Image: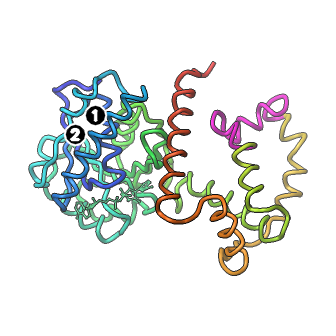
Amino acid sequence: MATSAVGAVVIVGSGLIGRSWAMLFASGGFKVKLYDIEQQQITNALENIRKEMKLLEQSGSLKGTLSVGQQLSLISGCSNIAEAVEGAMHIQECVPENLELKRKIFAQLDRIVDDRVILSSSSSCLLPSKLFAGLTHMKQCIVAHPVNPPYYIPLVELIPHPETALTTVDRTHALMKSIGQSPVRVLKEIDGFVLNRLQYAIISEAWRLVEEGIVSPGDLDLVMADGLGMRYAFIGPLETMHLNAEGMLNYCDRYSEGMKRVLKTFGPIPEFSGATVEKVNQAMCAKVPNDPGHLAARRQWRDDCLMRLAQLKRQEQPQ
Ligand code: NAI
């Protein structure tokens, strides 16, 4: 747990992701200051966090060792950015995904921060070389990309700028671990980072299989939810290879020719339009109508499942 001697964590942008970060950092015992350009967003965020934490406590899912009251007392709002960042040790930017806006925020922060604080962006897909170009405090800059909902999905991709100091990566990695997240080091920046590249590869082949009439949209989703996804919640694709034969070398001996044969049959990048989008949309809407009420209810169900899965994963310590 953090001690009071450690500087605060500042969240810039108090929307969906900013609120989640605030809860996670407070669960680790860090003092959190929530900043936003809209005062009302700060007020809403504080109220929303209070309600969320109470629900988490009731369901036994509150993270950390502190009580709800103790965690809430660590989080405060601040509508002045210079005051917010004074003495901070980590700034987590969470403004909308817009390169110009984020560059403006980082330029503003660059002018007022010291040489110690880490400047971290939650960006889902903007490259560090574009986000941080020209900043004086470049060595202290990093992208720390969470996955929604971050309270239940612990992965955080850490993507440095080529000039980011190794200590910045190490400190951010340690900070993420200290709040129970699961950081991974992306060693070189690449469009889509790692998670979205894997996700898009899956979406792409899923789309082609439906487009070619090989499988229905509903059954395609079942292949993932009741098949691959079952083990991917615990082990990745590389360890799956290792375990599905007598080790990795044996897997490649046995299956590489078959994999290459199938991979050669993969089609071009789908257009995600036309008759296939109609077909997929119809199937999805038959399952979950696309009005706000049904979508929100299904998201809530998904998050409840993820919460229980996160509890199970915490109990299942790796051997
Ligand atoms: P959001 O729209 O919910 O919240 C953005 C917040 O930033 C709002 O409260 C807004 O008032 C505030 N804001 C706008 N301009 C500002 C400024 N100049 N200074 C301070 N605050 C300002 O957005 P969300 O979904 O929380 O996304 C934030 C970042 O997190 C984006 O970069 C997004 O790509 C990334 N992200 C989002 C995920 C998601 O599923 N929503 C998942 C992973 C990352």
Please name whichever residue, 224 or 93, is drawn nearer the observer in this view of the structure. 224
Please name whichever residue, 76 or 106, is drawn nearer the observer in this view of the structure. 76
Please name whichever residue, 130 or 73, is drawn nearer the observer in this view of the structure. 73
Image coordinates of residue 109 in percent, x first then y, are 19, 57
Magenta segment includes 238: yes
Q: Residue at x 63, y 65 (%)?
A: 285
Q: Residue at x 84, y 32 (%)?
A: 245
Q: Residue beneath label 2, please?
A: 32
Q: Which mark is residue 94?
A: none
Image coordinates of residue 279 in percent, x first then y, are 72, 72
Q: From the viewer's perspective, is 44 left or right of 79?
A: right
Tell me the kind of residue under disc 1.
Ala
261 above or below 89?
below
The numbered mark, 1 or 2, whose residue comes first in the sequence reads 1
Total labels: the figure holds: 2
Q: From the viewer's perspective, is 125 left or right of 4?
A: right
Q: Looking at the image, do the residues carrying marks 1 and 2 touch, with CB atoms under 8 Å apart?
A: yes
Q: Magenta part of the protein: which range?
A: 227-249
The secondary structure type at the circle numbered 1 is helix
278 above or below 204?
below
Q: Which mark is residue 26?
A: 1
Q: Residue at x 43, y 63 (%)?
A: 126
Tell me the kind of residue under disc 2.
Val
319 above or below 266?
above
Check disc 1: other Cα within 10 Å, few if <14, some if 14-19, many if 20+: many
Q: From the viewer's perspective, is 136 left or right of 96?
A: left
* Quadrant position of the N terminus in the picture: top left
Q: Residue at x 50, y 43 (%)?
A: 303
68 above or below 37?
above
Image coordinates of residue 176 in percent, x first then y, are 39, 36
Colour mapping: rainbow
